[in-house]
Amino acid sequence: MRHPFLELDRPRTVRAIAHRGGGGPLENTLAAFADAVALGYRHLETDLHVTRDGALVVSHDATLGRVAGDPRPIADLTLAELATVRVGGREPVPTFVELVDAFPDARLTVDLKVDGAVAPMLRLLERRDDLLERICLGSFATARVTALRRRFGSRLMTAATPREIVRLLASVRLRRRPPRLTAGCVAVPERYPDAGRGVAVADQRFIEVAAAAGVAVHVWTVNDPVRMAALVAAGADGIVTDELGVLRDTLVRLDRW
């Protein structure tokens, strides 16, 4: 059965996914996500860290030095201490619960950045099983995703782990039968760096094999309209971008919004 996370408003729609709420100095704040939703985005991408007292909070980096000028590790701060920090000099760092509650119609692609995010996420989903239809969890660490799959099974939408991506790439290159994947989607860049070269990932052949394996392909982070259109033509199911207006206009022009 297709997971509710992947349901489309209409056939052939390409999922437009707002990367950290969109590029800019207010990334990963409720203000940024509100701007994305106002533009018509229903899919939001974000990242999670954990405070010293176990709160899931929305941030890409382990510290807030880049976005808020505060070099302290998030893991060393309590939620109350973090509440005094302002991203871009004006916006607070939201908790994950604040984010999902602020945009109840949005679906969220979530990157678990640290091992410590697993236990609080497990507890949250135990309390809020309504979120199982709205979020897709992924991580560069296979063990984090595996722990959540073990508990929630097919009720939870997960992105392919690095190991699963390698298996899928191997089947593409060797022209073998696609592997059976537990993931519901594959989130990949257009190219992976490899010994100074770029290994193509999200090309038409890869997307076709992923479709045969029963998983959607979401490509990150694409900000050029020419590349956006090329990925649509290749069959990509979703595109992650910082350039929210550019992607929206591109998909509208192609009748895929």
Image: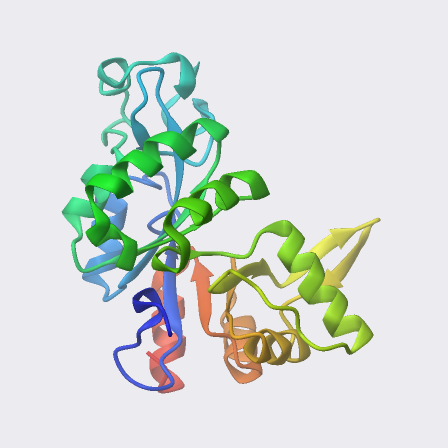
- Is 69 situated above or below 252? above
Left or right of residue 64: residue 177: right
Coordinates of residue 170 in the picture (x, y in percent): 76, 66
Coordinates of residue 111 in the picture (x, y in percent): 45, 44
Which image quarter: residue 252?
bottom left
Q: Nearer the viewer, residue 36 or 235?
A: 235
Q: Nearer the viewer, residue 132 or 17?
A: 132
Q: Which residue lies at the image location 51% right of the left edge and 70% below the top edge?
A: 215
The N terminus appears in which quarter of the rendering? bottom left
Q: Nearer the viewer, residue 170 or 156?
A: 156
Which image quarter: residue 93?
top left
Left or right of residue 207: residue 175: right
Q: Which residue lies at the image location 36% right of the left edge and 25% below the top edge?
A: 68
Coordinates of residue 115 in the picture (x, y in percent): 49, 30
- Is 252 situated above or below 162? below
- Is 78 situated above or below 255? above
Left or right of residue 154: residue 183: right
The C terminus appears in which quarter of the rendering? bottom left
Q: Looking at the image, can residue 141 be seen?
A: no
Q: Looking at the image, can residue 40 be seen?
A: yes
Q: Which residue lies at the image location 47% right of the left edge and 31% below the top edge?
A: 61
Q: Nearer the viewer, residue 37 or 76?
A: 76
Q: Which residue lies at the image location 26% right of the left edge and 13% below the top edge?
A: 81
- Is 143 situated above or below 93? below
